Each structure stands twice: as structure tokens, then as C-alpha cells.
């Protein structure tokens, strides 16, 4: 079971150091769950430092496919590895919506990261309009098959299903909706599958108990030590 916390554009380095110390104390003795945090770039070093000799992994929120070059605002695999970062998110719905990320660029980023030795959580999901139009499986098929064609079922790849209509809206897919989407994705690409979309301590048990849900990509609830730790503990209970 994998629980990843995506901090988005929150937490300064000083806040990150305090959070990491608190999380490590809070999760002491918890087993059966792999924990990942994804801070903004400016806090990566602060996160790596306290977790350097622990089981908590630190991922970036994005990574470029080039090792270096004239790509203003991007970050390379070599830069992340030099910091001691373990992996990266790729293709988050906010990257697709606000910054023009496409299925093809998501695949390029994924290939580069995996080839460099980083782990990857690649994000897929449909918008509210696409779901209402009955296009959920079509959208997921295009997104997932692009990844499958590029890298296949790589041992360091996980896929996060994040229905766009449930990102930062307070809406959450029902456990049945999550399971249905995850089962479909697994039929296309057999890798660990995380659910992302307003995951909270209050709904974590039901979502994580679904047979094809292997973990969660947590947004807002990952910014608070207590709520994030509670989700991690729910995952540990389910796997025990």
C-alpha cells in the first residue's frame, strides 16, 4: 500500500522541516505502508535531510525529459538525483489543465525519469464533462495506453487515478466509482494504482479497501501531520 502526499505550492523550507520531524514521530512503529511526500522544489532538500535514513520517500512534483538545457522553469532527473530525491509525480491534472501537459509529454517525462532510476507516479483521470458524457473509459484508455506503449508495466511505475472533478472540490468518487475505474486501468496496465481526489481520514478506509486500489495520492489532507498520518495508518490497517 502506497500513500503519497502532494503538497502542491504549499510549505516553505522551515515548515517542511517541522512537518517531516512531526510525521516521522507520528508514524513510528507503523508498518505495511510505503509513504511518499511531494514537496515543492524549494523544500526538497529540507525533506530529504530528515528522511535520508528512513522509509519515507521524497518525490518531486514534476520532472523534465532532458538532462539539461534551455528549459526555463523545469527541473531535470540529474538535479533531483543529486538532491537525493527518490522519484517524481508526472502528469498531475493541474499540470495538464494549467500548463499544457499532454499525454505525449507525460510519457516523455515518465520514460526519462524511469531510465534515470527515479520512481514515478503518473496521473490520469477524466473531467466532470467527460464523465457526464460517458467518456470516462475512452479518456482513461488514451491516457493509460500512451504510458503503456512508452514504458509498459515498469517495476518503478505507479499510476494515480484522479478524477479531475474531485481535485480540490471536496467531491470524492464513491468507493464503487473508484474501484470501477481502477479495474479498467489495471486491464490496460498492471501496475500499482492509487486513488487521488479529496482523500481524507474520513473516507480513506472505504476507498483503500477496494480490491484494485493500492494506495492514495493525497492533496490537501497531506499538509497536516495528523490527517496525513491517519490516512497512512488506515492503509496499514487494511494491509495488516
Image (tube, rainbow, N blue to C red):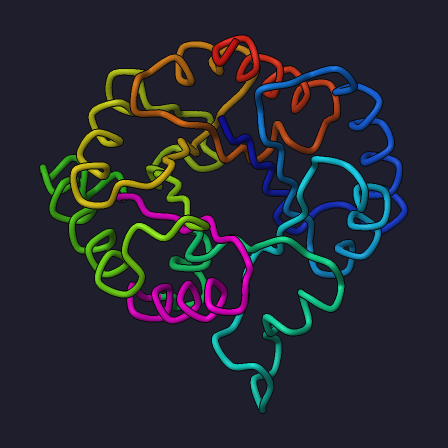
Task: State how many labels appear.
Answer: 0
Where does the image place residue 70, in percent across and percent down from the top left? Answer: 58, 91
Q: Residue at x 36, y 53 (%)?
A: 154
Q: Is residue 152 magenta?
A: no
Q: Which residues are magenta?
A: 102-126
User: In terms of depth relative to the viewer, which is nearer, 165 or 112?
Assistant: 112
User: In terms of depth relative to the viewer, which is nearer, 134 or 213?
Assistant: 213
Q: Residue 227 is drawn in which quadrant?
A: top right
Residue 62 vertical placement versus 231 (above, below): below
Q: Is residue 238 left or right of residue 71?
A: left
Q: Is residue 110 magenta?
A: yes
Q: Is residue 125 left or right of residue 67?
A: left
Q: Residue at x 38, y 23 (%)?
A: 172
Where does the image place residue 197, in percent across and percent down from the top left? Answer: 43, 32
User: In terms of depth relative to the viewer, which is nearer, 126 or 117?
Assistant: 117
Residue 18 vertical placement versus 157 (above, below): above
Q: Residue furthest bottom?
A: 70
Q: Residue at x 55, y 55 (%)?
A: 88
Q: Is residue 146 left or right of residue 154?
A: left
Q: Residue at x 45, y 66 (%)?
A: 99
Where does the image place residue 203, in percent across and percent down from the top left? Answer: 47, 13
Residue 69 vertical placement versus 34 (above, below): below
Where does the image place residue 141, in percent across and percent down from the top left? Answer: 16, 49
Q: Residue 194 is drawn in which quadrant?
A: top left
Amino acid at each position: 500500500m502506497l500513500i503519497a502526499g502532494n503538497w502542491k505550492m504549499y510549505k516553505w523550507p522551515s515548515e517542511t522541516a517541522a512537518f517531516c520531524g512531526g510525521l516521522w514521530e507520528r508514524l513510528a512503529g507503523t508498518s505495511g505502508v510505503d509513504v511518499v511526500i511531494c514537496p515543492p522544489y524549494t523544500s526538497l532538500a529540507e525533506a530529504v535531510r530528515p528522511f535520508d535514513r528512513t522509509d519515507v520517500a521524497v518525490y518531486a512534483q514534476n520532472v523534465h525529459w532532458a538532462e539539461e538545457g534551455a528549459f526555463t522553469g523545469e527541473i531535470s532527473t540529474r538535479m533531483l538525483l543529486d538532491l537525493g530525491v527518490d522519484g517524481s509525480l508526472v502528469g498531475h491534472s493541474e499540470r495538464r489543465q494549467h500548463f499544457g501537459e499532454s499525454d505525449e509529454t507525460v510519457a516523455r517525462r515518465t520514460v526519462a525519469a524511469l531510465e534515470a532510476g527515479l520512481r514515478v507516479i503518473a496521473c490520469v483521470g477524466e473531467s466532470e464533462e467527460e464523465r457526464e458524457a460517458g467518456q470516462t473509459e475512452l479518456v482513461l484508455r488514451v491516457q493509460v495506453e500512451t504510458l503503456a506503449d512508452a514504458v509498459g508495466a515498469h517495476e518503478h511505475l505507479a499510476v494515480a487515478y484522479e478524477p479531475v472533478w474531485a481535485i480540490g472540490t471536496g467531491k470524492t468518487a464513491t468507493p464503487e466509482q473508484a474501484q470501477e475505474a481502477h479495474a479498467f486501468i489495471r486491464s490496460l496496465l498492471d501496475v500499482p494504482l492509487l486513488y487521488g481526489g479529496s482523500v481524507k481520514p474520513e473516507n480513506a478506509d472505504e476507498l483503500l479497501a477496494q480490491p484494485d486500489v493500492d494506495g492514495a495520492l493525497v492533496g490537501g489532507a497531506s499538509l497536516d501531520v495528523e490527517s496525513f498520518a491517519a490516512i497512512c495508518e488506515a492503509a496499514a490497517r487494511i494491509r495488516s
